[in-house]
Image (spheres, helix red, strand yellow):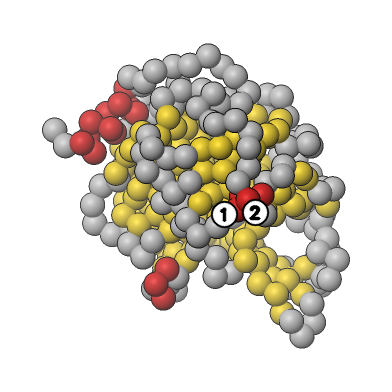
Amino acid sequence: MTKNRRALGAIATGVLVTGTLVSAPAGAAPATATSQSAVCSMRLGSVTPGGDHTMQTITATPSASARKVGPKDLYPDGQARLPTAIRTSYQAWDGLEQRTGLVVLGVRMYSTSYFADPTGSAIVPGTLKQTLIGGGWDDLHKYVELSHAAPGGQERSNVYSLINQFTDGLIARWTVTPSGWKYYTTFGGFSAVKTMVLIGQGSTYDTFLATTNGGALYTVRIPTGAGNPVVTKVRTSTWQSFETLIAEKCGNSGTLLLGIDKNTGAGYLYAVGHANGAATVIKGLGKVPTTFPATDSYFRYFSGGTVLTGA
């Protein structure tokens, strides 16, 4: 049995050390930010039950700007969930920002694109486009992300979904091409995964941090072509309190990680060094001084051209 299969089996069967439920994982070092992580930040977005977009800046201090709501009524009330990260690009000549991402409305996946006006909170009239991708996106889908990057100059787009498939847990992968989503592939053995977040984008792979229901923290490196995921344990316990993880590039090879506990509305920040199994450095930066509504679905805004290098 290979090392990879043993790791997959451990996730699938839940043979993990389970820690006491705590709000801030005990596996993180004390809240002391490095000079590098202190300047890192993320633009956190969310979709509200009313179908609005929100935005606020979270810094590694930690601090949080005022939450800006808008554009409003972008989606029908109570329909939007599983938003992916939203890619942004500025047009210098008119000060407008284009925003593009995926979202599930009901059981259908859509691509959404619009230009925000200079205030960032309203749509430029006539620029909203919502394109149907396909149906079948029911409640079995727990997490969705689009990885669009050009590491080493090689542009690619892949979509991933974590699916509760009867008694098993699957990670599905698609390759996005100009003619549609192709090369659908699934990988089994992930039934114990609670949530995950993209932290690394290579020319031939994507890497995620994944938490389990038992509180363990793993990296899952998924090839964009042939081959199976490589699963590596990072921590054994205390990460089960987070329903949502958001990650942003920090420095040359690190990650600014936000964990949101929807049961309490609290969020905690971590400076995560380049992924290296149990030797990965994780420093707790503290509790973010704001409340995260449990009814929102969270994502990150990122500038086009950004490549995550945390793994």
Q: Position of residue 212 (x, y in %)?
A: 45, 28
Residue drawn at the location 30% of the way across and 26% of the way down: 10
Q: Are marks 2 and 1 in contact (CB under 8 Å)?
A: yes
Q: Which mark is residue 40?
A: 2
Identity, as a three-letter code, of the amino acid under mark 2: Cys
Residue drawn at the location 41% of the way across and 45% of the way down: 275
Q: Quadrant of the N terminus?
A: top left
Q: Identify the secondary structure beneath mark 1.
A: strand
Q: Identify the secondary structure beneath mark 2.
A: loop
Q: Position of residue 276 (x, y in %)?
A: 37, 43
Q: Which mark is residue 250?
A: 1
Q: Is residue 160 visible?
A: no
> In the figure, 231 relative to 250: above or below?
above
Q: Quadrant of residue 154?
A: bottom left
> In the figure, 33 relative to 69: above or below?
above
| Residue furthest left as drawn | 1
Identity, as a three-letter code, of the amino acid under mark 1: Cys
Q: Nearer the viewer, residue 263 or 295?
A: 263
Mark 2 or mark 1: which comes first in sequence? 2
Q: Is residue 309 left or right of residue 249?
A: left
Q: Position of residue 83 (x, y in %)?
A: 61, 50
In this rendering, the count of numbered labels is 2
CA distance separating discs 2 and 1? 6 Å
Q: Is residue 194 left or right of residue 224?
A: right
Q: Is residue 15 left or right of residue 257?
A: left
> In the figure, 240 relative to 115: above or below?
above
